[in-house]
Image (cartoon, helix red, strand yellow):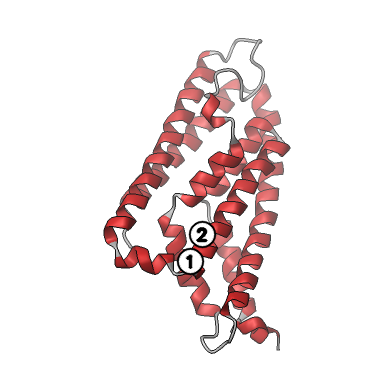
């Protein structure tokens, strides 16, 4: 029976739950979308690669019991939590600065692209930026372990294989979703090139959402 493959108790429920969770907006998907809108498909996939690697690392850490360690040592959780919140806040503030510069130069024909010389250099490494955003999220570690554990048969002899298959399903689902966001972002980029004010407004909106993620993570608890 398919639901019992590799120690997974109910694989189709897991698939449906994973799809629902992946579709929820978060800093990873929003960063990939905004990167594709700013810099095109290739940069969007570089950002997606950072998300894949970060998620894989979090899944591995969760399977190894790091979430339990964070629960057992609240000060460690606080360090990771506030570091992640500070990083997301810094990304949001940097985007706001870039949006202001684009608004200020909106009538300058010499800067036709959504991303230009006004874009801070530190935002021009989408793979590394997406990787750090993904890793500095202790809530994701706790989510992975709490979600995965529901579908792993405790009596199965090789639970690592169960986690591997669950992680593969999550990554494939994420890849399909991020691909859709990347091509949606390139469509938005074409619109933004024609509408400078829209581009600045959209960047401001994304920055505000990142600041919201920062506050939400800073106030989160184990």
The quadrant in which the N terminus is found is bottom right
The spot of residue 22 in percent (x, y) is 58, 59
What number of labels is visible? Answer: 2
Q: Please tell me whether residue 2 is drawn above or below residue 97 in the rendered image.
A: below
Is 170 left or right of 67, judged from the image as shown?
right
The spot of residue 121 in percent (x, y) is 54, 25
| CB atoms of marks 1 and 2 within 8 Å | yes
The spot of residue 194 in percent (x, y) is 68, 22
The quadrant in which the C terminus is found is bottom left
Q: Which mark is residue 171?
A: none
Per the image, label 1 sits on a secondary structure element best described as helix
The spot of residue 54 in percent (x, y) is 55, 52
Question: Residue drawn 60% across and 37% down?
Answer: 126
Q: Please tell me whether residue 217 is drawn above or below residue 154 in the rendered image.
A: above
**Alpha-carbon distance for marks 1 and 2?**
6 Å
- What residue sits right under mark 1 in the picture? 62
- What residue sits right under mark 2 in the picture? 58
Per the image, label 2 sits on a secondary structure element best described as helix
Q: Nearer the viewer, residue 61 or 91?
A: 61
Q: Please tell me whether residue 85 is drawn above or below residue 190 in the rendered image.
A: below
Task: Categorize mark 2 by other alpha carbons within 10 Å: few (<14), some (14-19), many (20+).
Answer: many
Question: Residue drawn 69% across and 43% down?
Answer: 45
Is 180 left or right of 14, judged from the image as shown?
right
Question: Residue drawn 72% across and 42% down?
Answer: 183
Question: Residue drawn 58% across and 86% down?
Answer: 157
Task: Categorize mark 1 by other alpha carbons within 10 Å: few (<14), some (14-19), many (20+).
Answer: many
């Amino acid at each position: 029976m398919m639901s019992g493959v590799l120690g997974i108790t109910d694989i189709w429920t897991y698939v449906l739950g994973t799809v629902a969770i992946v579709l929820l907006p978060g800093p990873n998907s929003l960063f990939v979308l905004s990167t594709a809108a700013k810099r095109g498909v290739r940069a969007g996939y570089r950002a997606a690669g950072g998300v894949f690697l970060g998620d894989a690392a979090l899944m591995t850490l969760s399977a190894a019991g790091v979430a339990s360690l964070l629960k057992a040592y609240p000060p460690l959780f606080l360090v990771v939590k506030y570091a992640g919140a500070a990083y997301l806040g810094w990304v949001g503030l940097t985007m706001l600065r870039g949006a202001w510069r684009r608004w200020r130069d909106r009538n300058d024909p010499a800067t036709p692209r959504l991303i230009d010389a006004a874009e801070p250099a530190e935002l021009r490494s989408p793979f590394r930026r997406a990787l750090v955003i993904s890793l500095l999220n202790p809530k994701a570690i706790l989510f992975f372990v709490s979600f995965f554990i529901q579908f792993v048969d405790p009596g199965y002899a090789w639970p690592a294989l169960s986690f591997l298959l669950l992680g593969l399903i999550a990554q494939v689902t994420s890849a399909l979703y991020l691909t859709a966001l990347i091509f949606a972002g390139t469509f938005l980029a074409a619109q933004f090139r024609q509408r400078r004010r829209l581009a600045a407004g959209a960047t401001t909106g994304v920055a505000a959402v990142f600041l919201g993620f920062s506050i939400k993570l800073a106030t989160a608890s184990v």
